[in-house]
């Protein structure tokens, strides 16, 4: 995502608003806020990784590393906030479900104390199917990347 602001850029979305937008809760809420969003284009989420998170009790106790699937989930949650904001009131009562994950790559371990910047770009949307490309950076270094798609469906 490029720097600068435009009239469409949305400022920070705090954790309380994130929890209004997506249904995830601890321990599966994997973004702390969205620091920048351009509706229908991109979003940047933040995840502060801390040692007191439950996954570090078993992954791996002597060398804690954030599980890759949880990094991918943080990408999906950032994308879900982008979708909900983009669709506005039309998204009320809907959920964003994973359909596929492709080209996932993990470039460096994410460990407690790191701050993940989750950069999500919309690649395409057709009907209720959206495609994304995401990168996670820590201290300006790429930690992970993936392409994924999601479907927007009514809650059951």
Image (cartoon, rainbow, N blue to C red):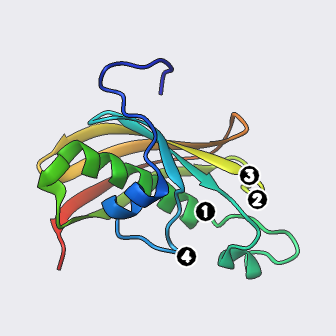
Residue 84 horizontal/vertical position (percent) = 26, 52
Q: Is residue 86 above or below residue 1?
A: below
Q: Badge 3 local density, few (<14 within 10 Å), some, or many (20+)?
A: some
For the residue pair 134 and 38, the one nearer the viewer reads as: 38
Q: Which residue is mark 2?
A: 111
Label 2 and label 4: CA atoms lie apart by: 17 Å
Residue 24 horizontal/vertical position (percent) = 41, 70
Number of callouts? 4
Q: Which residue is mark 1?
A: 68
For the residue pair 20 and 97, the one nearer the viewer reads as: 20
Who comes first in sequence, dot 3 or dot 1?
Answer: 1
Q: Badge 1 local density, few (<14 within 10 Å), some, or many (20+)?
A: some
For the residue pair 50 and 147, the one nearer the viewer reads as: 50
Nearer to us: label 2 or label 4: 4
Q: Which residue is mark 3?
A: 114
Q: Secondary structure at mark 4?
A: loop
Who comes first in sequence, dot 3 or dot 4?
Answer: 4
Nearer to us: label 1 or label 4: 4
Q: Secondary structure at mark 1?
A: helix
Label of residue 27 in the image: 4
Q: Badge 4 local density, few (<14 within 10 Å), some, or many (20+)?
A: few
Label 1 and label 4: CA atoms lie apart by: 15 Å
């Amino acid at each position: 995502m490029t720097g600068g602001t435009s009239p469409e850029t949305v400022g920070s979305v705090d954790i309380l608003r994130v929890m209004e937008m997506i249904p995830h809760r601890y321990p599966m809420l994997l973004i702390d806020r969205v620091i920048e969003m351009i509706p229908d284009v991109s979003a940047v989420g933040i995840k502060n990784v801390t040692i007191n998170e439950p996954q570090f009790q078993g992954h791996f106790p002597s060398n804690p590393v954030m599980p890759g699937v949880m990094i991918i989930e943080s990408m999906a949650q950032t994308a879900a906030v982008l979708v909900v904001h983009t669709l506005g009131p039309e998204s009320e009562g809907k959920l964003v479900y994973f359909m596929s994950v492709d080209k996932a790559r993990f470039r460096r371990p994410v460990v407690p104390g790191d701050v993940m910047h989750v950069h999500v770009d919309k690649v395409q949307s057709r009907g209720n199917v959206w495609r994304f490309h995401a990168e996670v950076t820590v201290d300006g270094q790429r930690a992970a990347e993936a392409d994924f798609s999601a479907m927007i469906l009514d809650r059951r």
